[in-house]
Amino acid sequence: MSLTAMFSAALPIGIGATVVMDMWGLLLRRFGVATLSFAMVGRWAGHLLNGRVRHQAIAKAEPVRHEQVLGWGIHYAVGVLFAILLVGFVGERWLMAPTLLPAVVLGVSTAVAPLCLMQPLLGAGFFASRTPAPARNCVKSLTTHFVFGVGLFLSAGLRASV
């Protein structure tokens, strides 16, 4: 499968899965569960462009222009990137008849990114160790990425049906 074909297949799958994950986030917020503000991801990216990689507490860092839009853009770009990885691993046969397991395994695996990369860079520590409830935050991240995996499966199924 060419890189262009992989990207063409992964783009709607990644966007769809990210939308499913965002709907999950909206549901959590409706029930009073705090979720990540993607503005903080945008803030981090804005500071990264100026050479600052790690923060003690990203919420206390100087805001950057258009951080909300930047953060949401990064969020969706990463969702597409993860979908490209899935398509690269499972191949064209899976795209014609998607199954749940590979999508969920990849989705849950993507929780490594926030737990071991973004949280430490934003000041929350590895596995949210610098937050008031690290275990709860880890479970929340794993659950959210499980939902992302389900979204990968649903989006691939929708793509295969048209």
Image (cartoon, helix red, strand yellow):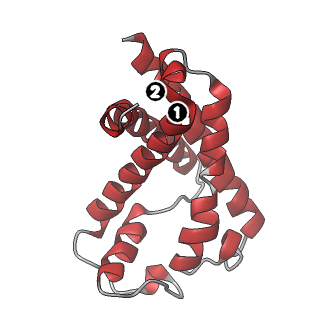
> As drawn, is 137 to the left or to the right of 51?
right
Q: Name the residue under label 1.
A: 151
Residue at 38% in and 38% down: 15
Is residue 30 placed above or below 99 in the rendered structure?
Answer: below
> As drawn, is 51 to the left or to the right of 139?
left
Residue 133 image position (x, y, % from top left): 73, 69
The secondary structure type at the circle numbered 2 is helix
Kind of residue indicated by mark 2: Ser
Residue at 60% in and 55% down: 33
Residue sitting farthest toward the right: 135
**Front one among 92 and 70:** 92
Residue 87 image position (x, y, % from top left): 49, 34
Pointer 2 with pointer 1, Cβ within 8 A: yes
The secondary structure type at the circle numbered 1 is helix
Q: Specify the quadrant that holds the C terminus.
A: top left
> As drawn, is 70 to the left or to the right of 90?
left
Q: Tell me the crowding category of disc 2: few under 14, some 14 to 19, or many 20 or more residues within 10 angstroms, Cα based.
A: many
Q: Tell me the crowding category of disc 1: few under 14, some 14 to 19, or many 20 or more residues within 10 angstroms, Cα based.
A: many
Disc number for residue 98: none
Residue 3 image position (x, y, % from top left): 35, 39
Quadrant of res 112: bottom right
Residue at 47% in and 40% down: 83
Q: Specify the quadrant that holds the N terminus.
A: top left
**Front one among 63 and 53:** 53
Disc number for residue 155: 2
Is residue 128 placed above or below 160 in the rendered structure?
Answer: below
Count up the numbered dots: 2
**Front one among 129 and 160:** 160
Residue sitting farthest toward the front: 2
Residue at 40% in and 76% down: 44
Kind of residue indicated by mark 1: Gly
Is residue 81 placed above or below 86 in the rendered structure?
Answer: below
